[in-house]
């Protein structure tokens, strides 16, 4: 959402913080009770909505259901209201989903017909199966003791807990606003999911200072090329070595196939993912800090790009999955950090970016020698082939800045070809 504030264009940056809460057995009982009562209350509201022509007007529902919610489910005022709001929100989401997936059938002439679905297509009320509670800040939950302690209002009384969260203090610095949080239990652990929002200045095309082309790969995790013609490589070697070690352990565990091996394998994948996340955090952080505000980062749009997947071995397949996941994650991290820093990430078509000559624009696949890692064009241009992609991607960004909304390369067929 973009809006104007004191002459600047700003927008809201939102994310969800997952705070793990430490509870005593006694506190856990109170949490269990509250989240279970709340779940049942939501189902009660849901049934009413289902039985009453899907009336989603909050004022109506509140007038009719409020005292039952307080009496039957022992919910406090705020929680009773939240259970109505949450149930309405769930119906609205489902309504949207139904609308987007029309019923499709072929008529007698074999033509496709579509019927828009509405909530009336539901044949039973939406079910809330997971115990949870939606807590409003400063009513149901608050941070006390300089943000060290979480105070939560349960059905009976207010309880105080400590929590895990190394960097959480920064969200209490006054720049972020904390929204309605969700209390949930996951595998025996309790979490509070808190949506946090802050206002950031928007990137403005007209004020751009840097345009950075970023190529993602295996030999080099990233190759960046900036408007001054500087190339920087983040080597993938260390990563590859470390990943290879991970792979060996994975293979061993897989071949064992025992129950305990499977468990260890699962814990192990978690470790590998966390480690890769750290790498991606570091790369994106370094990039954003290096170029500062008003920077446009240009990446290839890799959605829909696939390699010959069917020919891949199991290990190659896992590598492929990890790589696409990791590329996607880097993109997410970079986008988030860029938005925090008045910068932007642009995704461009990947077509011909590794084949095109950055000097004369000729697109010729054979110009690239994969073994020598050399790119050489008939026009005389020669370069390390790893930077070609980043250079071409950077140029697409420059084209976007100058007004081309969908910059891409096309092969120009000449008579001599
Ligand atoms: Zn050339």
Image (tube, helix red, strand yellow):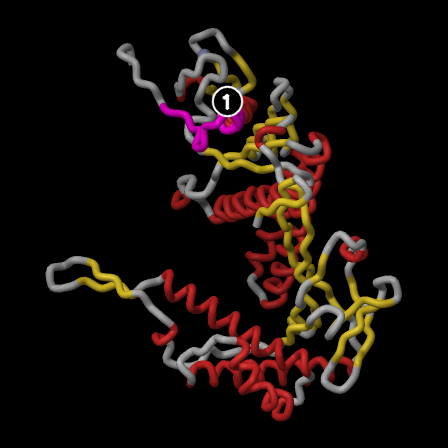
Query: Residue 371, how many percent across, how many down?
Result: 50, 22
Above/below status of 377 relative to 284: above
Q: Residue furthest bottom?
A: 71
Query: Residue 87, how many percent across, how many down?
Result: 53, 75
Q: Judge by depth and name the residue closer to the eye, 243 or 248.
A: 243
Is label 1 within 8 A of ligand 1 (CB to nearest ligand atom)?
Answer: no
* Quarter of the view holding residue 98: bottom left
Above/below status of 203 relative to 363: below
- 303 relative position to 114: left or right: right
Magenta-span inclusion, residue 132:
no
Q: How many marks?
A: 1
Query: Residue 256, how many percent across, how many down?
Result: 58, 60
Query: Residue 25, how many percent across, how many down?
Result: 78, 81
Q: Which residues are magenta?
A: 397-410
Quadrant containing the C terminus is top left
Q: Residue at position x 61%, y 18% from top?
A: 229
């Amino acid at each position: 959402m973009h809006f104007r504030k004191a002459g600047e264009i700003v927008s809201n940056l939102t994310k969800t913080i997952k705070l793990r809460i430490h509870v005593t057995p006694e506190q856990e009982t109170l949490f269990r009770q509250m989240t279970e009562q709340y779940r049942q209350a939501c189902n009660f509201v849901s049934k009413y909505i289902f039985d009453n022509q899907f009336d989603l007007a909050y004022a109506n529902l509140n007038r009719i259901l409020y005292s039952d919610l307080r009496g039957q489910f022992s919910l406090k005022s705020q929680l009773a209201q939240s259970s109505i709001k949450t149930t309405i929100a769930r119906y609205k989401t489902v309504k949207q989903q139904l609308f987007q997936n029309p019923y499709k059938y072929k008529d007698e002439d074999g033509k496709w017909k579509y019927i828009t679905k509405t909530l009336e297509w539901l044949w039973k009320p939406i079910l809330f199966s997971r115990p949870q509670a939606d807590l409003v800040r400063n009513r149901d939950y608050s941070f006390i003791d300089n943000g060290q302690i979480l105070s939560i209002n349960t059905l009976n009384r207010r309880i105080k807990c400590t929590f895990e969260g190394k960097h959480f203090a920064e969200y209490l610095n006054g720049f972020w606003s904390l929204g309605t949080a969700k209390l949930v239990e996951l595998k025996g652990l309790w979490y509070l999911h808190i949506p946090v929002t802050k206002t950031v200045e928007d990137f403005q095309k007209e004020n751009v200072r840097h345009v950075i082309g970023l190529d993602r790969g295996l030999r080099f995790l990233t190759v960046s090329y900036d408007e001054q013609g500087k190339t920087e490589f983040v080597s993938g070697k260390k990563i590859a070595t470390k990943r290879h070690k991970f792979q060996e352990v994975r293979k061993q565990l897989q071949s064992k196939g025992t129950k305990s091996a499977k468990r260890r394998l699962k814990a192990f994948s978690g470790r590998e993912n966390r480690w890769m996340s750290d790498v991606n955090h570091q790369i994106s952080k370094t990039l954003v800090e290096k170029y500062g505000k008003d920077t446009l980062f240009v990446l290839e749009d890799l959605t829909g790009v696939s390699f010959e997947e069917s020919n891949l071995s199991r290990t190659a397949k896992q590598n492929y999955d990890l790589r696409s996941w990791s590329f996607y994650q880097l993109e997410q991290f970079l986008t988030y950090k860029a938005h925090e820093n008045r910068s932007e990430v642009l995704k461009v078509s990947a077509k011909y970016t590794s084949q095109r000559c950055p000097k004369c624009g000729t697109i010729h696949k054979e110009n690239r020698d994969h073994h020598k890692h050399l790119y050489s064009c008939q026009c005389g241009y020669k370069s390390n082939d790893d930077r070609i992609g980043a250079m071409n991607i950077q140029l697409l960004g420059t084209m976007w800045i100058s007004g081309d909304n969908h910059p891409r390369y096309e092969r120009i067929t000449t008579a001599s070809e």
